[in-house]
C-alpha cells in the first residue's frame, strides 16, 4: 500500500468512524488520567469542557464526531495540562494510535 497507489478515497472513508472513535477514547483516557496523576488544567474552563466531553461520549452515535465534540476536543488538546498528561502517557493506559 505504501509503495503503490495507497488507499482509495472509499477505503479512506471506511476508516473515519474508527479514527473518530479512537480520538474520543484517547481524549477520555487523558482526561481521566489527569485526576489520577494530579495534573490540573492550564485553563480552568477546560474542566467544564472535560465534563461536556464525558457527557457527549455517552450520548453520541459511536464513530461520529459532531461539531460540538470536535470543538471540545480541540480546546482540550491545546491545554497545557492535557499536554503535560499526554507526555506522561507511559504511566496510564493510552491507545498506541494516540501518539
Image: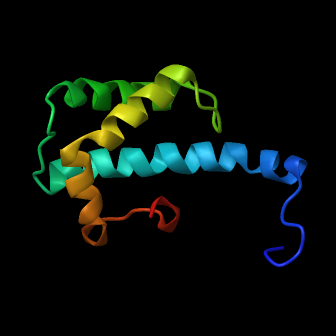
Residue 88 position within the rendered picture, expressed as x and y whole percent measured from the top left: 24, 66
Residue depicted at 23% across the width and 30% down the height: 46
Residue 57 position within the rendered picture, expressed as x and y whole percent measured from the top left: 48, 32
Q: Nearer the viewer, residue 30 or 5?
A: 5
Above or below residue 60? Residue 95 is below
Q: Specify the quadrant of the image occupied by residue 20.
A: top right
Residue 21 position within the rendered picture, expressed as x and y whole percent measured from the top left: 58, 45
Residue depicted at 20% across the width and 49% down the height: 34
Residue 58 shown left or right of residue 8 in the figure: left
Above or below residue 92? Residue 18 is above
Q: Quadrant of the C terminus?
A: bottom left
Q: Quadrant of the N terminus?
A: bottom right
Residue 20 shown left or right of residue 48 in the figure: right
Residue reaching furthest to the bottom = 3
Q: Nearer the viewer, residue 71 or 34?
A: 71
Q: Nearer the viewer, residue 63 or 83?
A: 83
Residue 90 shown left or right of residue 10 in the figure: left
Residue depicted at 31% across the width and 41% down the height: 78
Q: Specify the quadrant of the image occupied by residue 41.
A: top left
Amino acid at each position: 500500500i505504501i509503495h503503490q497507489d495507497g488507499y482509495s478515497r472509499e477505503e479512506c472513508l471506511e476508516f473515519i468512524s474508527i479514527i473518530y472513535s479512537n480520538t474520543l477514547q484517547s481524549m477520555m483516557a487523558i482526561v481521566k488520567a489527569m485526576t489520577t496523576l494530579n495534573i490540573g488544567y492550564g485553563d480552568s474552563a477546560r474542566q467544564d469542557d472535560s465534563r461536556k466531553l464525558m457527557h457527549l461520549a455517552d450520548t453520541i452515535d459511536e464513530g461520529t464526531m459532531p461539531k460540538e465534540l470536535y470543538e471540545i476536543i480541540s480546546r482540550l488538546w491545546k491545554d497545557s495540562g492535557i499536554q503535560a498528561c499526554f507526555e506522561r502517557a507511559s504511566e496510564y493506559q493510552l491507545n498506541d494510535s494516540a501518539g
